[in-house]
Image: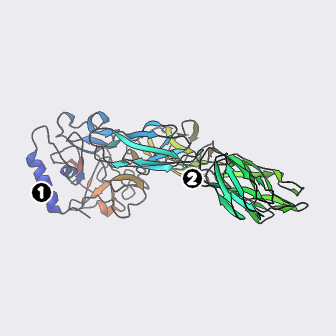
Amino acid sequence: MGRPLLALVIVAVWVAGCVRPGAYHCRQNVECLVDDMQGVCEALGFCSFPDGSCDGGFRYGAYAGQYANQCVTQDNSGFYTIGGRVVGLEGNGLLLRNNGADDLRIRMSGPFSFATELMAGEPYEVTIGAQPSNPMQTCVINNATGVPDEMDVSDIEVTCSTSSYAVGGTVVGLVGSGLVLTNKSGDDLPISTSGTFMFGTQVLSGDSFEVAIKTQPSGQTCDVSGATGTIGTGNVSTVVVNCSAGTYTVGGSVGGLEGTLQLRNNGGDTAALTALGSFAFATPLASGANYAVTVYAQPMYPPRNQTCSVTMGSGTMPAANVTSVGVSCATNAFTVGGSVVGLVGTLVVQNNGTDTLTINGNGAFTLPAPVLSGDTYSITITQQPANQTCSVSTSPTGVVTNGNIATVAIGCASASDPGILCGSTYCDPKIELCCIENGVPGCATSCTGTDVVPIRCDDQADCAAAGQSQSICCGLPTSDVTNIYCTTADHCAPPHAYYCDPTLANPCPNGGTCTPTSSPFPGWYRCY
């Protein structure tokens, strides 16, 4: 909703009345509203305004003291790093994310900082994009949200702890009393009846388990299958204690597994594998019976999308347990790509700093090297086309999950009009707006939803109008504090006023003269 005109006038008069020659000190952003142009009250106490010709996207106003009319930089404005420390990390794949977009892969405990710096007053919210695996861990964040206040943020704490899981399985054919199982000769478990069992002491992911019979039941002899392995991503349920005479278990060993794999024997007996090592199906078979082990459900992300295969999976039961079924799992890799719009020339992009692709036209693209499921990708532009500026506006970073990535969007525009500066990224002026949602900027095809507003256009004429070859940024000289994004010529027709770029051949296609504003902060032009 627009700001009332009266309030706007009061602000403008108050600003002008309090200006001292050479310097005007602000305290909040509302004091930097001039000629319907919303500025930012920088950490140094001076107003800055959008300017796409500056690397940081903002330029100080004329009344910013020693910084007057200078581009805002990290040294003079309060661009601050967001970071902290990770402790307890042992697994692979931890991904931190700031404000839902700035992804950072963490490989070891210690200090970290995100690549994208924030201006003073711009909020941050750090979340977990992916938890570490192998071993499985759960990481939590303290001091995850805040606003930089004239200093780098370094107190975000990410604490990781290794997950633990229970070890158990099934007891079959138990009649006698006194059966006692033990795990690693330390955790004893009395068993009184057939059925499922679970040891009371959980085992950390990455640690081993070893189930054995400590005491046989009276009048029976039981044996254990699937008794040893390494804890992975969930509870172990494939240990089988068989006390039924004349029957034998079907099982084997699994390697390379990260996740949960479901096997079936003879189309019905299901075993959910989560650990590396030995396993067995819960239903024993008599000697001479047939067995046929198949994959029922492959592992999926998280933590990884895998394909597992079975060897020596079928045959006829001998008068002994079958332990020769082999299961081997390999992590799948998927391609990373997306689409390019507005490109005229040659563009070079790179994934994860090594995988390079040269793009010569608009449309879909795919990086040559696939990325393993559960691993991250990061798309950067290593070579801009001549006379153009391209930026990755959508999905520049992320995690490869269960399929190919095709959502990376790259927009290109002429160097004289790089598009709408949206935080630290230029949006494609042909198809995107810069939307501010709860204070966080991001490129989108439309600005909709609660607490979502379009960012103001800058003096590079950032929105398309009436099919003009150069974009024109329109705005109402009334109480509306958000500019109108031009879609038809009448949006720029009188009595509407719009910002203009005096370097263009026809900066005011609907009449008027591109004239400097007469506000206390000169440097902007509008058609009058």
Relative to residue 142, is residue 451 depicted above or below?
A: below
Identity of the residue drawn at 89% across and 60% down: 287
Relative to residue 221, is residue 69 depicted above or below?
A: above
Position in image of residue 488 (x %, y %): 35, 62
Indicate the secondary structure of the residue bearing disc 1.
helix
Label 1: few (<14), some or many (≥20) within 10 Å? few
User: How far apart are labels 2 and 1 at the CA level?
Assistant: 50 Å
Q: Nearer the viewer, residue 177 or 15?
A: 177
Position in image of residue 281 (x %, y %): 76, 59
Q: Is residue 206 magenta?
A: yes
Q: Which residues are magenta?
A: 201-207
Q: Which residue is mark 2?
A: 406
Q: Which residue is mark 1?
A: 10
Label 2: few (<14), some or many (≥20) within 10 Å? some
Q: Is residue 482 magenta?
A: no
Residue type at tag 1: Ile
Task: Decide if residue 30 is on the left or right side of residue 57.
Answer: left
Residue type at tag 2: Ala
| Sequence-earlier tag: 2 or 1 | 1
Which quadrant would the C terminus be assigned to in this image? bottom left
Q: Is residue 393 visible?
A: no
Position in image of residue 424 (x %, y %): 38, 44
Which quadrant would the N terminus be assigned to in this image? bottom left
Splitting the image into 4 quarters, where does residue 468 fall?
Answer: bottom left
